[in-house]
Image (cartoon, rainbow, N blue to C red):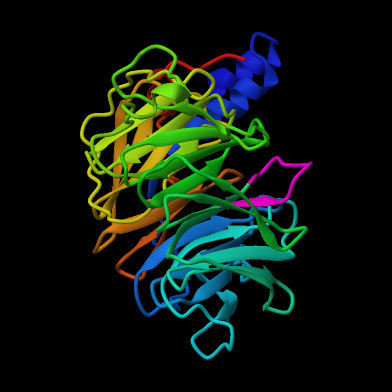
Amino acid sequence: MLSFISARQSGLDEPLRLRRAESTRRVLSLELNKDKDIEQIHGSGINTLDIEPVENRYMLSGGSDGVVVLYDLENLSRKPCYTCKAVCSVGRSHPDVHKFSVETVQWYPHDTGMFTSSSFDKTLKIWDTNTLQPADVFNFEGTVYSHHMSPVATKHCLIAVGTKSPKVQLCDLKSGSCSHILQGHKQEILAVSWSPRYEYILATASADSRVKLWDVRRASACVLTLDQYSGEKSKASSETVNTAHNGRVNGLCFTNDGLHLLTLGTDDRMRLWNSSTGENTLVNYGKVCNESRKGLKFTVSRGCSPEFAFVPCGNTVAIYTIYSGELISVLRGHYNSVDCCVFQPDFQELYSSGRDSNILTWVPSLRQPEPDDTSDEKVNSIPLERG
């Protein structure tokens, strides 16, 4: 670390290089935090987590019991050993609680005054955080597997919803109705994700082994159907043969710059795609265990060089370098399958949860550096990307 500080001080490196190097070092040293607990509210498995992007302080969780819980991640006690308390919850006694398993929760991207939740009870609910009452409820004909709001949209307020139906539904918060339907998949939609780069680009993953990219402004909205066997640009017209995986595709995640898309399938493979051309980059991640029959929530780092993917694998969380496919580390601590994880970019912390009803916190190791400053060696062994 001293070498990075010296290079920055002398003007040899750009200022952000030190920050990226330290963020990378911290991710490489993630370990289970034994001093920080998350209050256990859920009585069964936890399917989904989300940290609000404004302060990166409040976290939502949704469980198989239909309960939604809001946590404050800040250490208000100022003690080294502490428990993050639940601020409030939509518990079983709440009149508007979901009747069945909550599959996705998400904060409104621009402030903490609103959040959303969707469930196997065929509803998507829009919640007022202050009153903990639903401001709106969207009802569907089938089970809701996933929903997502665009993190960058300024000209629309659409929520993409994946259900048991092969049709992708777009719900408009302004009008309170389902304004669009995207048709093209053959089976249920297990995951949806808006691009963090282009507000009208949407990715969807289905049990039909296909991943599609849509421009919701266009009449023929599907612009790409990803093909695992093609290194060339995929055509929407060839969607009858294009498959992204050899099994159900139940995980989607864009890189932070929106230039690439990661997908997970029940064929135990993770693939990286060029989101502009649909090209399979052919990065080999090896076997990525995935036995989930529904959506699997994984995430990527932010502000590191290189960037990392955090992927639930059985009762562990595997950490991969996104662009090389190298397995960096495996985080062990859960007693049952892990279903979701979320990254806190300010402190390079990771939160994971699953069927053991626990939310675990993974934090950078605080071990003292060696006298010869060998703490830089692990960072320097991975080339830092410039720019």
- The answer to whether one can see residue 191 in this image is yes
In the image shown, does 367 or 131 lie closer to the viewer? 131
Q: Position of residue 350 (x, y in %)?
A: 46, 50
In the image shown, does 49 or 307 lie closer to the viewer? 49
Q: Main secondary structure of the magenta part?
A: loop
Work out which residue is located at the far top of the displayed protein and give it: 12
Question: How many discs mark residues in the rendered view?
Answer: 0
Query: Is the residue 271 above or below the residue 84 in the image?
Result: above
Q: Which residue is pictured at 28% across the width and 60% down the height?
A: 334
Residues in magenta, as a range:
150-160
In the image shown, does 190 or 257 lie closer to the viewer? 190
Question: Where is residue 47, by image quadrant?
Answer: bottom left
Q: Position of residue 283 (x, y in %)?
A: 33, 21
Q: Which residue is pictured at 68% across the width and 36% down the height?
A: 199
- The answer to whether one can see residue 368 in this image is no
Question: Where is residue 9, by image quadrant?
Answer: top right
Q: Which residue is pictured at 54% across the width and 20% down the height?
A: 276
Q: Position of residue 176 (x, y in %)?
A: 72, 63
Query: Is the residue 9 above or below the residue 33 in the image?
Result: above
